[in-house]
């Protein structure tokens, strides 16, 4: 009788454990970011599709791990899932930074082609690190913000330019600016103290982080569309039963489709809002466009040299060669 009760208790406990599977999912972006809201909707859909058997708790704004710690946290199994910007890991492998090569893909359709070309190689890299990609969503094109007017490349020389990955660090160097590593969540404070004067980021970040309160000049250089990736630790995913895995993948597919559509729609709305908040929206001067284009050509060539044959294959696939 005791043995039977023990077995029943064990079965009951196992059932409760399965019903209460919980994942923490950190992101470095604020709760009001459209990227974070998309991940939250993904989490909500997972809970709904699994009947509450899998609950994902989102931790925005670097509240659980700092932005630059998040990839490592999910890679080592400290958290089951996470969201991070892929190009932030370009120092590990150049393939992670392909979507941040300046002026390679400067529209949503081009960014989608580049994503499709790079997806197999990036998924292979993450799999080797024990992670599975669930979905990936681009930010609107990166444009130039400046505390002071920028009429030519010379106006950027010597300025303190925010950098958040190797590509933005290199751009700052080529523009003879001073690169300063600052995460997005820390940018308003850096602007307030004069630690940053110029930077490349999306219209979305400008609105969501209220950067218009401290920066008044916006230049539509639309340099590249970097992607965030939401990933899961492979062991955590494998621990789910088949129906739960299928629910996660179904919600992830919806999140990717929704995210791309939302990003493109919001880009236009965000630029209008920046103007309404007092920012001057400028088309870059011919001299600035020429300089940035030359930097892009040089950095694409440099990237291919660093990435090797696999990188060349991605660029060729993107260009349809």
Image (spheres, rainbow, N blue to C red):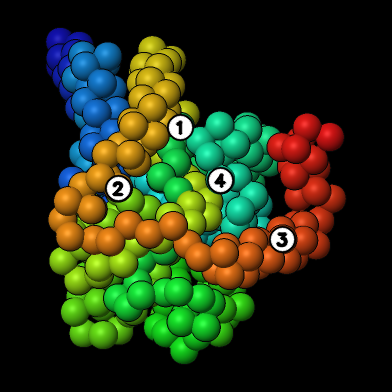
Q: Quadrant of the C terminus?
A: top right
Identify the residue under disc 3: 297
> Is mark 3 in CB contact (under 8 Å) with mark 2?
no
Q: CA distance from mark 3 to mark 2?
A: 27 Å
Q: CA distance from mark 2 to mark 1?
A: 29 Å
Q: Which residue is located at x 53 percent, y 51 percent?
A: 224
Front of the two marks 2 and 1 = 2
Identify the residue under disc 4: 106
> Is mark 2 in CB contact (under 8 Å) with mark 1?
no
Front of the two marks 2 and 4 = 2
Q: Secondary structure at mark 2?
A: helix
Q: CA distance from mark 3 to mark 4?
A: 13 Å
The disc, 1 or 4, on the residue closer to the chain's N-terminal end is: 4
Q: On screen, 64 above or below 190?
A: above
Q: Secondary structure at mark 1?
A: strand
Q: Quadrant of the N terminus?
A: top left
- Residue 134: mark: 1
Front of the two marks 1 and 4 = 4
Left or right of 269 in this view: 156: right
The disc, 2 or 1, on the residue closer to the chain's N-terminal end is: 1
> Is mark 2 in CB contact (under 8 Å) with mark 4?
no
Q: Secondary structure at mark 3?
A: helix
Identify the residue under disc 2: 271
Q: CA distance from mark 3 to mark 1?
A: 32 Å
Q: On screen, 81 above or below 116?
A: below
- Mark 4 crowdedness (10 Å alpha carbons): few <14, some 14-19, many ≥20: some
Q: On screen, 176 above or below 29?
A: below
> Is mark 3 in CB contact (under 8 Å) with mark 4?
no
Q: Which residue is located at x 29 percent, y 28 percent?
A: 42
Viewer can see residue 89: yes
Using the rendered view, name the quadrant where residue 114 is placed: top right
The disc, 2 or 4, on the residue closer to the chain's N-terminal end is: 4
């Amino acid at each position: 009788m005791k043995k039977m009760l023990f077995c029943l208790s064990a079965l009951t406990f196992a059932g409760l454990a399965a019903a209460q599977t919980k994942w923490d999912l950190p992101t470095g972006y604020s709760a009001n970011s459209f990227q974070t809201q998309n991940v939250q909707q993904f989490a909500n859909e997972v809970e709904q599709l699994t009947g509450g058997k899998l609950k994902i708790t989102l931790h925005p704004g670097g509240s659980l791990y700092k932005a630059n710690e998040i990839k490592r946290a999910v890679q080592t199994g400290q958290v089951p899932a996470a969201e991070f910007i892929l190009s932030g890991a370009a120092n590990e492998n150049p393939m992670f930074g392909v979507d941040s090569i300046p002026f390679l893909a400067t529209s949503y359709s081009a960014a989608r082609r580049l994503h499709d070309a790079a997806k197999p190689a990036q998924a292979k890299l993450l799999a080797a690190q024990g992670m599975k990609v669930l979905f990936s969503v681009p930010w609107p094109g990166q444009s130039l913000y400046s505390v002071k007017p920028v009429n030519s490349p010379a106006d950027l020389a010597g300025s303190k330019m925010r950098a958040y990955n190797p590509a933005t660090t290199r751009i700052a160097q080529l523009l003879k600016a001073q690169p300063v590593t600052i995460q997005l969540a820390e940018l308003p404070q850096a602007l307030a103290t004069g630690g940053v004067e110029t930077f490349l980021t999306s219209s979305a970040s400008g609105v969501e982080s209220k950067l218009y309160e401290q920066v008044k000049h916006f230049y539509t250089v639309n340099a590249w569309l970097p992607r965030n990736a939401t990933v899961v630790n492979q062991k955590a995913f494998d621990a789910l039963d088949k129906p739960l895995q299928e629910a996660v993948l179904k919600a992830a597919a919806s999140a990717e489709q929704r995210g791309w559509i939302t990003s493109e729609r919001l880009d236009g709305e965000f630029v209008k809002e920046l103007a309404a908040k007092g920012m001057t929206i400028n088309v870059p001067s011919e001299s600035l466009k020429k300089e940035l284009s030359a930097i892009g050509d040089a950095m694409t060539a440099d990237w291919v040299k660093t990435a090797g044959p696999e990188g060349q294959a991605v660029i060729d696939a993107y260009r349809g060669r």
